[in-house]
Image: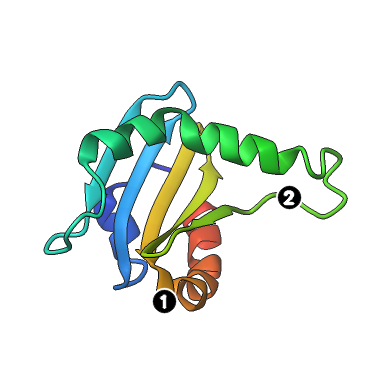
Amino acid sequence: MGLLTPEDVFSLHPKIRWAALALESGMVVFCQMRQGVQSLTPDDEDRAFMQMGPLFMTGIALRLTPEHRAGKLEYVISCFEKDCVLMTKVPDGFLALSVATPDAFLVFNELRPKILNLLA
């Protein structure tokens, strides 16, 4: 898999508001709002989160089934009043994207096969 771009992520669904990619080292490759969409959080906070947040959150989720009896972890979702963030492991790093809360579960369900295909 080549390095993803924000445009690759935004092309998956028109309701994706924000996309970010960080390497396992914590280096943020990109952290970007979709053009024309107002951010709910400052860019520096988003970048700080991406440095370690997905590593911790997916790591904690993996501890729920360390022997993969429930299958491989696909993604972790954090929902807030206004926005939900999906985080998933990609080769050498972590991908995160956000969708407005009212649309999140429908959109994430639609995105599941597209994300799995993107990572294949």
Disc 2 residue type? Lys
Q: Is residue 79 left or right of residue 70?
A: left
**Pointer 1 and pointer 2: residues touching (CB < 8 Å)?**
no
Q: Is residue 85 visible?
A: yes
Residue at image coords 16%, 60%:
38
How far is mark 1 from mark 2, CA to CA? 25 Å
Q: Is residue 72 above or below residue 35?
A: above
| Rendered location of residue 82, percent (x, y) | 36, 65
The image quadrant that residue 95 belongs to is: top left
Front in this rendered view, residue 66 or 101: 101
Return the residue at label 2: 72
Q: Nearer the viewer, residue 49 or 65?
A: 49
Under circle 2, the secondary element is: loop
Residue depicted at x 14% and y 60%: 35
- Residue drawn at x 88%, y 50% as measured from the top left: 69
Say what amino acid the circle numbered 1 marks: Asp
Q: Which dot marks residue 116? A: none
Q: Is residue 101 above or below residue 39?
A: below
Direction front: furthest residue? 81
Count of marks placed on residues: 2
- Residue 91 in view (yes/no): no
**Which residue position is annotated with label 1?**
103
In x, y percent, where is residue 102?
A: 42, 76
Q: Is residue 3 above or below residue 73?
A: above
Q: Nearer the viewer, mark 1 or mark 2?
A: 1
Q: Secondary structure at mark 1?
A: helix
Callout 1: few (<14), some (14-19), or many (20+) C-alpha neighbours within 10 Å? few
The N terminus sits in image quarter: top left
Q: Position of residue 3 (x, y in %)?
A: 36, 40
User: How far from the left and from the top, in percent, is residue 24?
Assistant: 49, 27
